[in-house]
Amino acid sequence: MSFKRAGVSLAALFLAGCSSMGPSAPSGPIALGANGSMACAALVSGIDAASIGLPTKGATIDSAAIIEASAVSVAAQGGTPASRVNPQTPANCKVLGRILPMDASAPPILFQVNLPLNWNGRSLQYGGGGFNGSVTSATGLMVAGRYDQPSPLAQGYVTYGTDSGHQNKPGEAPQAFAANDEAFVNFAHASYKKVRDVAVALTQRAYGRAPYKMYFAGSSEGGREALTMAQRYPNDFDGIFSRVPVINWTGLMHVSNRAGLTTMGDAWLPRAKVELVHNAVLAACDEMDGVKDGLVANPVACKARFDVSKLQCTGADAANCLTGPQVKAVQSYYASYKFPFALANGVTEYPGWGVSGEGTPAAGPTGGWSAWYVGNSVPSQPAKPDNGISWFFGSGAMRHIFVREPNFDVTKYAPDLYHTRVLEISALMDSTNPDLSVFNARGGKLMMLENMADYAQSPYAGIGYYESVVQKMGRETADKFFRLYTAPGVDHVGSGAPGNVDVLSALSNWVERGQAPSGLIAVDQELKLPFASLRELPLCEWPTWPRYRSGNVNAASSFECVK
């Protein structure tokens, strides 16, 4: 969890030509013209490159049409749990378009902007996920939002998202787009800024004014994008929410590649061995919070207590023990990945993973070791669909992004051999700059959530980043604009334990009313109407965690956040 920091400030790069002064608050809802359909159709005209703060050849609008209102529904199956919820959506103007690249061989940046007929004067940009490659519609739930609350679009926000400047293609690796330099820079940071500026221009055209307040929310890759906006473009957003961000992207790709290499052959753990570790962690740590409830509430203390070597077989391999190679593989997973040189912002390592939630059933490809770490078959080259997702992502990144040889044998990879390229990628991709002074000075607010049973990325990377900001800027200053929360037992996409919370209200109240977040409640809900609550917990601010006091174990009031 070491973050060694370079003392380089990027503040001067952002101050020139920027102003924190923005439009005034609207007195009430703002209509999309006297006739919404006509006003929507009139948006089909180009946007000049001068309206976009980074080099482009302008933007074109492919279509603009009114989408009729729809009722809330839940898909029978799909990807992440939240993606199965189709929230109630009001009639709105759906705008599809593209931002034209400077390099004629680079793909355009596709985007979708949703304009409510009655606008609340605010906008919310949605982040993407994975390697992106498809347009984020920005019509779904708020990141980490409760299933039973209205979507931001239904609350009156202009919402928008992008494909980050490339489209996935059948039969092609999702990292293949990075062969084009402009496409990779767009994925790293530029597309989100460009689409933000296009959305402002469209909002100005549609309603006669720019947004009063602008927000960004993203999870995973989108969480990295969220932190990137605070670091690279600190004058562009008033409030930012980052959940489970792939923050040290370079480190994550390397440690994900290592996860596959260390579980090849006899070291691989089948599902029964995953359950063995899962149950051993619960036996060691479940009752540390004062109640036996199947939840490790203090995973930091549990990681220090749990010793996987105690599961090692004393004789032949058996169902109730781990072989020596399997123990070493798990120990490697818990250990940090150390680079032989410093990455961007002086970072020298990626932290290892923690404990709890190893056997979480995958709600789609989302949960536990069997989804991310070991998959359902021994890692192979190239990665197979049933290998762990981390291996698929990490080994693919080594081939297509770091080495740029699609058929490269990743067992022969070492960062020393590609020193220059690794540093180039780190400077583009890693959202690890602890200097948020410009973002703070112009009144920006940042909330971050780490799910402590996350095996897509290590929650300790986000914790390390938060602590680096505190060290850089001081506790008193950091507390004025930055909050980090942790959710025990919750996996990468919010399953496994209470992980849904009304962040947007907390963030907007902090930005617009100066009311710092307090008393947040996370809930675990049924994934069917009417989204009944199964369990609640207080969402504790780092470094506190929820300890049981007394009462109903499913009620948040039965717990207190303690250090």
Image (cartoon, helix red, strand yellow):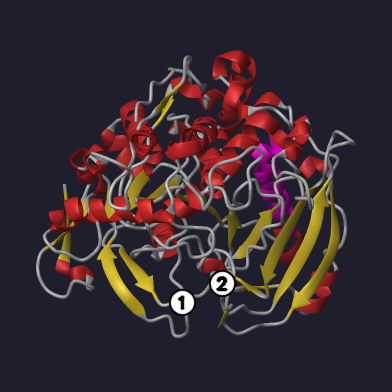
Residue at 46 percent across and 33 percent down: it is 262
* Residue 449 x %, y %: 39, 51
The residue under label 1 is: 527
Q: Amino acid at mark 2?
A: Arg
Indicate the quadrant where residue 136 lies: bottom right
Range shown magenta: 185-202
Name the foreground residue: 500 vs 404.
404
The residue under label 2 is: 84
Residue at 75 percent across and 42 percent down: it is 52
* Predominant secondary structure, magenta span: helix
Q: Is residue 186 covered in magenta?
A: yes
Residue at 52 percent across and 49 percent down: it is 220
Q: Is residue 492 covered in magenta?
A: no
* Residue 109 x %, y %: 77, 47
* Residue 426 x %, y %: 57, 26
Disc 2 to disc 1: CB gap under 8 Å: yes
Q: Amino acid at mark 1?
A: Leu
Return the disc, 2 or 1, that comes first in the chain's sequence.
Answer: 2
Find residue 389 and name its label: none
Helix or strand or loop: what does disc 1 sit on?
loop
Helix or strand or loop: what does disc 2 sit on?
helix
**Image: 6 above or below 65:** above
